[in-house]
Image: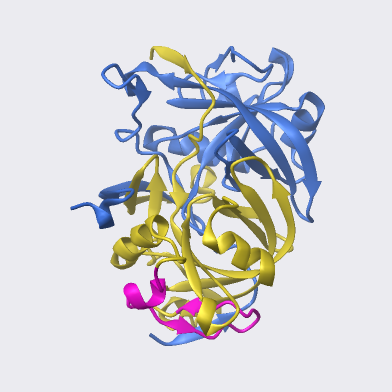
Chain colours: A blue, B yellow
Amino acid sequence: MSKIHWKPGTMIYPLPAVMVSCGDSKENYNIITIAWTGTICSNPPMCYISVQPKRHSHQLIKNSGEYVINITTKELAKATDWCGVKSGRDFNKFEEMKLTAGKAKHVSAPIIIESPVNIECRVKDVISLGSHDMFISEVLGITADEKYFDKKTGMLNLSKLRPLAYSHGFYYELGSMIGRFGYSVKK
Amino acid sequence: MSKIHWKPGTMIYPLPAVMVSCGDSKENYNIITIAWTGTICSNPPMCYISVQPKRHSHQLIKNSGEYVINITTKELAKATDWCGVKSGRDFNKFEEMKLTAGKAKHVSAPIIIESPVNIECRVKDVISLGSHDMFISEVLGITADEKYFDKKTGMLNLSKLRPLAYSHGFYYELGSMIGRFGYSVKK
């Protein structure tokens, strides 16, 4: 393999393509699509989203300190892309994309009913890094489509979920399953 | 869709399954597999990894303040899983997995030659969150397999790369491409 050096860049992929819902009343509900998100701590469960200060949702999230991460799938791909391109200053994104704002259990921000997994978050800290502010957040609760609840184990089983991936400018479905964590040492 | 509420958890997926190489001399080179990683800022390019303090690599990264994120593919899946299960206290992971430690351009940590994209990082801050410490880092440079360099555009084109994904306990290949960022508004 021949290697070339390249300038610094954002090359960690694949990333989740999630729709983040925010706002604290019907009048200002909004959706922003985000790939700069992930888990930062397992216990307590914590996550982050990074948002440009110029984005309409930035102020909404800063004001309320709350938001919901909505996992997306192939069926939601077009809405996911559209909500990442358009601004809530110009459109009611829920109406335009025919998405349903549902009541969250822990936060004032709405959940997106059509998303299979909704992750309710509260901001603990905001770190300004340059083009983006990072919202360090705690996960308050999960709402999931009942079909992912495994009655036998009493756990959420997401192996049937094919969450949308974003990789260097393109959206992908997840493909073949290669193995379960730990498979390399199983006998 | 019938919804159920669930306790807080780590449900943001898919995430990258990367091998992080660390250590500052041949004697202590190590590899840890990490999914709690992502981009936190575009300009300057910044990223994070979250690591449990008990992990062998935690001390190595804390000591040197440097590491390399190595993107993985299907061919590296077994090594990726193995390096996430075993400890560098017990094994020389490069030797065991027949991986080659190459010289990085900006940091003392090695790159993994067999990985198609190596992202050299320097720690700017460490935030203790609970089970995990988050290493807030700047990206210093990228090394990529030459085949991803597009001579026409002078850019890196990773659309042929199928980086390994991790989703709720399972590794996946990326599947079908759904669209390019902005496709929902293209005419």
Q: Residue furthest front?
A: B90
The structure residue drawn at horizontal position 61% and vertical position 18%, both measured from the top left corner, is A110
The image shows residue B2 at horizontal and vertical percentages of 39, 12
The residue closer to the viewer here, A30 or A130, is A130
Q: Which residues are magenta?
A: B91-112
Residue A93: x and y in percent read 61, 27
Q: Is residue B83 magenta?
A: no
Is residue B103 inside the magenta stretch?
A: yes
Relative vertical location of residue B42 with respect to residue A31 in this rendering, above or below: below
Relative image position of residue B98 (x, y in whole percent): 32, 78
State the residue at coordinates (45%, 22%).
A114
Is residue B139 in sight in this rendering? no
Q: Residue at x 57, y 74 (%)?
A: B23
Q: Give the overall secondary structure of the magenta segment.
A: loop
Quadrant in which residue A109 is drawn: top right
As drawn, B38 above or below B61: above
Name above or below for residue B27 compared with residue B79.
below
Say left or right for B66 vs A64: left
